[in-house]
Every structure is written in structure tokens, then in C-alpha cells.
Amino acid sequence: MTLWNSRISIVYNTVIHIYFFMKLTILNDNSAGPKFLATHGLSFYIQDDVNILFDAGPDNTFLENAKRLILNIKPDFTVLSHGHWDHGNGLIYAPSNMLVYHPACFNKRYSKVKNIYVGLNSNEVELANKFKLSPSKSPLKLSQTVTFLGEIPRTTNFEAKQTDFIGSDGNPDFIPDDSAIVISTKDGLVIISGCAHAGICNTIEYAIKVTGENKINAVFGGFHLKTDGEQTQKTITYLKKHNIEKACPSHCTSLPALSEFYKVFKQPQVLTGNYYTF
């Protein structure tokens, strides 16, 4: 399935491949760089052959940081990685465009421990007044180089086996809407997750399957790893096996896991205000 212009599609079908300069800007993450703001949440801005706002954090912090970066936010698409407040409550402040998301993003969900509501404040009807809605469980090609992965299959034997959340029916909520985007660059895939509730290795496996590309340049976003235990170590082993040099976990990845990743990959901490080019 595709949403990009049919005229571009004609060109794409007649050219082997065109890679665009890609820039990833951190508009909000849990930790702030000098002169920037940070709240618990995630919002990235991707500039490639299309511009994409990937998550909007919990409030309008991403817009304030964009101003400080002198960055004019004009996304062709806004992509919601999953339906948690710290990724999607800022949508009401985002520019109007097309909103891409898994249809389960608007499920009512709660913290298992404290029974606190952790879903989105807005519903689909409200957001339909602002955005053109494009829900999809299937992979969705947003441009020549960018793909929304949709629902990610959970195939590894060490990820997505437990959850901290419950649904409105009281049953465990494994966040089936968790998704990511993948960008094809001249040096391989760049994969960006929101929280990787489906597992970051499962996310990578699906990105490879959907794109047909095996070389991975970088992986960014929340990895949802809390300790330096077995899952973290198996994840590091998996990333090393795939020769991934730029492993840049942030947001919902806790300090013990971040420390283990730094020991192996030596990537500086992801901070609000940082940007990366590919």
C-alpha cells in the first residue's frame, strides 16, 4: 500500500533507486541538550524525500524546541508509534496533515501497577477534525524511501513476553499497535521506534522483511529495556550479529540498559536538540 504521489511512483519505477539526504532531529526526549527542554516522552522530526513528525510527545515541548532550533515544522505526515500519552498527547499541537497510525492506538489502557490511565487524551473523532486519518495494520509506504511498518510480528523468544499495562477489560495489554518507521539510505536502513513494545529485534526483523534490505545503518528510539539482564544482553548480541554500529536507545530505555549499550556501541546519549544526518 502506498500514499506517495503517483507521479513519483512512475519515476521510481523507471530509476533503479534514488537516495535522499536524510536528517533526524530530536525534538523531545527524556533528557535535554543545552538550551533545550525535555519532558518524559518522544518526538522526532525526519527530513528525507518527505518530512515526517514521528510522535508528538506529551505536550507542546516539541514545538518550543523546534523554535529554538529555528526549524520550521511542516510535515507531510505525522506518524504515531503507539497509543500512549507520552507519544501522542502532543498531537493537538501538531500542524494539520495526514496522521498515520495503527487502529488500536486509541484503545483505553492503564498501568498495571497503579491503575493509572496511560492512553491518549484525544480520540479518533476529535483528531479527525484536525488530521486526515490513515490507520493501517499493514506496512504503508509513505514515500520512495520511508515505510510505516504497521503491526509488528513478535517472533523472538525473549521479547514482548511481559507487559506493564492492562486494557479497559482488565486483561494484559501487550500494545499490539506498537510500530516504527524504516528509512532506506545509501548506507543501509535507519529504523526508528517509539518504545519497541513489540521488541526492538522483532522490529528490525520486520523492517528487513518489509524492505528486502539486509544492511542496517542505525536504530533509534525507545527500546523499552529496563535492566542489564538477559533481554538486554540478547538484544545487544542480536545487534552485533547484524553489524549495527549506530545503536542509539533513548526515552523508555533505563540507565542500566543504556550503560550496557554504551559499553558496546560507544554512541553518545540521545538528547533533545541533537540531530543526525545520513
Image (cartoon, helix red, strand yellow):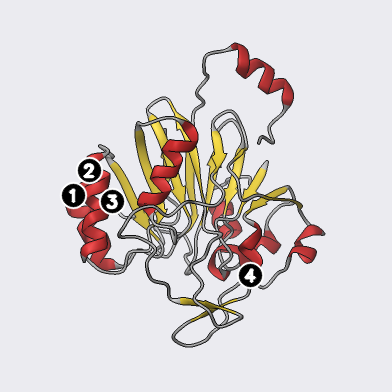
Residue contact at pointers 3 and 1, CB within 8 angstroms: no
Question: Comparing marks 3 and 1, which lies closer to the viewer?
Answer: 1
Residue 181: percent from left, percent from top: 51, 45
Q: Amino acid at mark 3?
A: Pro
Of all residues shown, which one is farthest toward the bottom? 114
Gap between marks 4 and 3, in whole Å?
35 Å
Whichever of callouts 2 and 3 sits on the residue coming sooner in the sequence is 2
Q: Residues within 10 Å of mark 4 (few under 14, many from 20)?
A: some
Of all residues shown, which one is farthest toward the left? 263
Gap between marks 3 and 1, in whole Å?
12 Å
The reply, left or right, for residue 89 in relation to residue 275 is right
Pick the quarter of the image with the N terminus.
top right
Residue contact at pointers 2 and 4, CB within 8 angstroms: no
Question: Comparing marks 1 and 2, which lies closer to the viewer?
Answer: 2
Question: Comparing marks 2 and 4, which lies closer to the viewer?
Answer: 4
Of all residues shown, which one is farthest toward the right? 129
Q: Which residue is mark 4?
A: 107
Which residue sits at x=41%, y=30%?
213
Residue contact at pointers 1 and 4, CB within 8 angstroms: no
Q: Which residue is mark 2?
A: 240
Which residue sits at x=54%, y=68%?
86
Whichever of callouts 2 and 4 sits on the residue coming sooner in the sequence is 4
Q: Which residue is mark 1?
A: 264
The reply, left or right, for residue 78 in relation to residue 161 is right
Q: Amino acid at mark 4?
A: Asn
